[in-house]
Image (spheres, grey):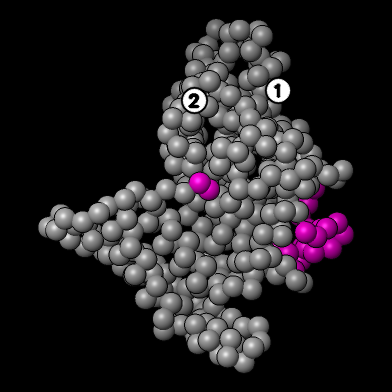
């Protein structure tokens, strides 16, 4: 399995070569070119985890077991700060993602919040306006009193941000962007379970996932322009690729917040569910989706994700060349033979990722 999965690194190189070859070929001969675009349960109480994280940990990493083996849940757990992204949480996320991308037993990753009503918002600003007003470090804070409450929810820890020098802010945002990019590049499917507020950096985190599931009561938006800044962790790039350029501009320019139903109607999320009494309806739906992935060939899913991600960034002709290179990687695998044999014998396949 390790050897087979390790071959994906070589495949990425081959995919880039295939893309370059296809691009060169398209220059020498006419042909149609199209731009590919895409829109895009069970209870865990008391069981289902192979290990329990300590209550004070800001990021809980849980490996599910039994029928959910292969599913990993990353739970944001900064309750006092509404899961705001700060230096420590970004560091923990980066470390967790780095471990997951090299773990061959991981099949799907779910990002969720363990704080009721919040996916990733921001710490309250009521005490920030009086802090160090004479320093340039607070220049990013709002000046209109009636806008203060709206600023509470930009997905970053503004109390921490207010104490940073401008050079520190740039470094922090770069690290956050790099970490979210690492999440987007995980080789396995990723699902964001949005059971509460996801604004600013919180929504950017969700946008980096392959699939988003939201409760109908959830609130989502890229609200950075209210703070005279712009989304800095991928929002200006991923949102228009997801819902279209014009609508993405409208939402970012207006800092508009949408609920789960509207998010589904514009293609921001794939599934919307009514919230339940325990406040984890989106997570339960995400878990059900992850369970659908488990019986499929693990190598095939990884290669399919690579083909889709690479192909979405190029024209159709180049994308088809990428698909060809990716498909070729699945032909010599033991899993492909097992799939054919299981079909012939009318039994469930037993894939090993080889």
Magenta stretch, residue numbers: 39-65
SS at badge 2: helix
Q: Residue 125 at x, y = what percent?
A: 68, 19
Q: Quadrant of residue 267?
A: top right
The residue singled out by tag 2 in the image is 250
Vertical comparison of 276 with 188: above or below? above
Between 77 and 39, the residue placed more toward the observer is: 39
- Main secondary structure of the magenta stretch: loop
Which dot marks residue 124?
Answer: 1
Q: Residue 251 at x, y = what percent?
A: 52, 27
- Image point 71% across, 36% down: which residue? 218
In the picture provided, is 219 more to the left or to the right than 321?
right
In the picture provided, is 72 more to the left or to the right than 354?
right
Q: Could you classify mark 1 by the number of other residues whose Cα lies within 10 Å: few (under 14), some (14-19), or many (20 or more)?
A: some
Vertical comparison of 32 with 175: above or below? below
Between 220 and 145, the residue placed more toward the observer is: 220
Between 228 and 94, the residue placed more toward the observer is: 228
- Image point 71% across, 22% down: which residue? 124
Question: Is residue 275 located in the magenta-colored stretch of the structure?
Answer: no
């Amino acid at each position: 399995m390790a050897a087979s999965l390790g071959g994906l690194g070589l495949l990425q190189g081959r995919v880039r070569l295939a893309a370059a070859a296809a691009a060169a070929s398209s220059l020498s001969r006419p042909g149609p070119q199209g731009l590919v675009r895409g829109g895009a349960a069970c209870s865990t109480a008391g069981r289902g985890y192979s290990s329990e994280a300590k209550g004070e940990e800001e990021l809980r990493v849980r490996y599910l077991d039994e029928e959910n083996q292969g599913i990993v849940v990353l739970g944001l757990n900064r309750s006092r700060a509404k899961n705001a992204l700060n230096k420590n949480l970004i560091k923990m996320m980066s470390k967790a993602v780095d471990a997951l991308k090299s773990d061959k037993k991981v099949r799907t990753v779910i990002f969720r919040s363990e704080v009721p009503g919040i996916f990733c918002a921001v710490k309250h600003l009521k005490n920030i306006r009086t802090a160090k007003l004479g320093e340039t470090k607070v220049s990013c804070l709002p000046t209109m009193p009636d806008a203060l409450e709206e600023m509470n929810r930009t997905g970053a820890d503004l109390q921490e941000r207010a104490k940073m020098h401008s050079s520190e802010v740039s470094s922090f945002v770069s690290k956050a962007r790099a970490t979210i990019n690492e999440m987007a590049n995980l080789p396995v499917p990723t699902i964001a379970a949005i059971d509460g507020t996801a604004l600013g950096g919180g929504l950017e985190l969700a946008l980096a996932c392959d699939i988003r599931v939201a409760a109908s009561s959830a609130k989502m938006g890229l609200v950075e322009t209210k703070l005279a800044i712009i989304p800095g962790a991928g929002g200006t790039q991923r949102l228009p690729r997801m819902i279209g350029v014009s609508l993405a501009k409208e939402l970012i320019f207006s800092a508009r917040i949408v609920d789960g139903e509207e998010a589904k109607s514009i293609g921001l999320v794939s599934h919307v569910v009514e919230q339940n009494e325990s406040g984890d309806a989106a997570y339960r739906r995400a878990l059900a989706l992850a369970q659908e992935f488990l019986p499929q060939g693990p190598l095939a899913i990884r290669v399919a994700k690579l083909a889709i991600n690479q192909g979405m960034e190029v024209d159709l002709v180049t994308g088809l060349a990428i698909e060809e290179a990716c498909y070729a990687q699945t032909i010599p695998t033991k899993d492909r033979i097992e799939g054919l044999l299981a079909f012939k014998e009318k039994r469930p396949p037993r894939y090993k990722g080889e």
